[in-house]
Each structure stands twice: as structure tokens, then as C-alpha cells.
Image: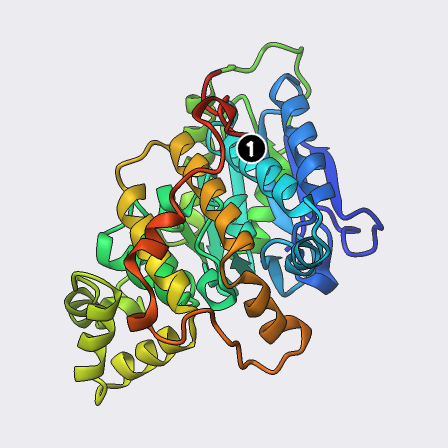
Amino acid sequence: MNLRNDAVEAKDEVLFEVVNGFGVITLNRPRALNAITHGMVRAMWAQLNVWAQDPAVRAVLIEGAGEKAFCAGGDVRALYESRVNHANEHQAFFIDEYRLDYLIHRYPKPYIALLDGIVMGGGMGVAQGAALRIATDRTRLAMPETGIGLFPDVGASWFLGHLAPTLARYLGLSGVTVNAADALYCGLADVWLEGDAPAQLKAMLRDFDWRTGAAGSPAKRPAGQYTSDSADLLERLRAVILPLGRTWTDAAPLAQVRASLDRHFSAIDVPGIVASLTNDARTPWAAETLALLQQRSPLSLCVTDLQLQKGRRLDLADAFRMELVLGYHAFATGDFVEGVRALLIDKDKQPRWRYATLADVPAAQADAFFVSPWPEDGHPLKALGEH
């Protein structure tokens, strides 16, 4: 569902338009499942800062072009090429991406994310900071980074850290893909629009009356006549959007296995989780989850588990700073290059991880990922949260 009808045909990778007071961002790489490039990150950062000061823009909505994806993540191939060619573009990308994601979390106007289709990795980064996260029947959401030798980033230390600990570990370690019902159940979506409700949303946004907070033909009024209070504007939007869908569901698949999930993912560490699942492998859900974990980088699993533990105690800015440190080590000494080679380059799906099993991963190796390569006053994200 595109608010801008010509989005797929446009040449730009990201489109910006103001429609009835909404600043509309359209991620426009449908053939690449709207994967985010560095250029897109820079463009969104610049435009969001402009819109923050523009009284004609009352709120922001971000969506993806095409029928398949909101955003399938960052441009992993470009990051891989930067690393294998000994360039530093990947580091610059993450610095700018995390600044953008932080801006979204702290945006001064209502920011709405329409999560129609695949939402993974970097897509979660530009979605989870939204004041209103809208899922649809096509939503497929995941943080699958451990499968390519990385860790859940783009603020996942913080937004997964605000979920129930067992759910956070399950989602972050396994990288499992969940649907709209599970996204709502976990707390990663605010409303689920079923059936033709997304089309109703499109019509409502085009006709939304900012003065009354109702859908109808918007009247032209003198500048400054609308309220400038962001919280009030958000409540008006919620009042017309939430009734279009569900804000709660008893149909979430994860709800049906929650007792087992809590039992297994409350183990002391990742080897304990694997041992618990192994003992329960006769049940389909435990067997499927065990199979997912066995495909992941053992080093990434250990790092991610520590990350989620630490992230629960950090504020948002510190979470991003920690993730930049983790990313530095993942590219320098971790499994990222091998994971991408196996999945996307050679496509043999047979990664030769640095450590073959969880038992082979030294505790000191995982701990080393949290040691900053920069002095305290030299961290690239030092200024995050200061303004």
C-alpha cells in the first residue's frame, strides 16, 4: 500500500513528499526489498531534520514501495564489499544509520511506520522508534543477524531490551520471522490492520482534518491555526487509526508455545538454552527452534546474549554506542564476512564459522567485543543524546 502511487516507477532510492500535512517517506528499491543504502540514510537524515522545522509538516509516515517489503534491512552486499576491500564505508554507514535511528526515536513530531511486508534488520531500525507501528496481514518481521555473523543492531539492544527477557532472547538469538499477530503479542507493533483496512488507512490519511482530528475533506486554514503539541497530534491520529485494526490478539502463534519458550530461554546462557531445547526436541516447536540456533554463528550467539543482558540496563544513546563497538569487532574479527559469503555471495549456505560450536567459543572472546576501540571522548557517537 503506497500513499504515493508512482513510487515503484520513480528512479530515486528514497522519495519524499508532503501529502495533506504528512511528510511521506517511501523506501523505493522494491527489487532489493527496499534495502537501505548509505545514500538513503543520508537523505532521510537530512529530510527529517528539515521537516522537523517545517510547520506545513504535521507528522511523518514511512512506507516501502512494492508489494513484498517495507524494508529487508541494510545493503549487506555493499557492507561486505567495503570490508573485503579494506575500505571504511561500512563503519561510516553504521555511524550515520545509528544517528538516523536515534533521531527517529526522539523525533519531535508523530512518526508513523507502515510495516507492510518484510521488516528485517535495518528496516526495524527505521520502524521501532515510530510513535505508531502499523502491521498488516503481510508483515513478516525479524532480526536475523546472527545468521550472517552479526548481532541484532539498529537499537535492538534497547527495543528488544524492553520486551520480556525470554521473548527478547528468542527473537534476538534465533532470528525467527514472526507475523503481525506475533509482532503485536511481543510488543513490536501497535496495531494490526487486517483485510482492506490498509486501503481505508490510505484514504483516511489523505482526508485527515488536522483541526478536528477526523477523516474528511481537509479545509484550508491560515498557518498557525493548528495546535503544535506533538502529543496531542499523536492522540488524534491514534484515535482514527487504531479503530481500523486490532491492538490485541489471542491468535498469536507464540502465545501457544509461551510456556515452553519461557522455560527454554530462561536458561543461564546460550549452551543452556540449546541443552534445554535438545532435551525437548521431540516437540515440533523446540525442534524447529533448535535447528535455527544450530544454523547461527556460535560467536554471534554468545555476543548477542551478552548484548541483550547489557542492553536492558542502558539508555537509548548508550545502546547505540555499545552497538557501534560491537559492529567494529564483528567486522574486524567476527563472522560477518564468512556469513555473507555463504548466504549471499557463493550461496552454498555452508558457513565455516570461526568457532564451530558453542563450546569452542572462549568467554573472553565474547567479552572482548564490548571493549571500545576508541577512547571515551573519541567515540563517533559521543554526542548522541546531548541535544
Q: 227 left or right of 164?
A: right
Does residue 376 sit above or below 241 in this rendering? above
Q: Residue at x 56, y 80 (%)?
A: 349
Q: Residue at x 55, y 54 (%)?
A: 331
Which structural element holds mark 1?
Answer: helix
Residue 276, horizontal then vertical, whole percent: 18, 75
User: Is residue 141 visible in this depiction of the protein?
Assistant: no
**Marker count (numbered):** 1
Front position in the image: 111 or 285:
285
Dot 1: within a 10 Å radius of its alpha carbon, few (fewer than 14), some, or many (20 or more) residues?
many
Residue 302, horizontal then vertical, whole percent: 33, 60
Does residue 124 sit above or below 341 in this rendering? above
Front position in the image: 5 or 92:
92
Q: Residue at x 36, y 63 (%)?
A: 301
User: Is residue 380 visible in this depiction of the protein?
Assistant: yes
Residue 325, horizontal then vertical, whole percent: 46, 41
Front position in the image: 274 or 174:
274
Does residue 126 sit above or below 209 in this rendering? below
The quarter holding residue 300 reads bottom left
Colour theme: rainbow
Give the quarter of the figure containing the N terminus: bottom right
Residue under label 1, please give it.
99
Residue 25, horizontal then vertical, whole percent: 66, 40
The quarter holding residue 77 reads bottom right
Residue type, numbered disc 1: Arg
Front position in the image: 174 or 61:
174
Q: 152 left or right of 72?
A: left
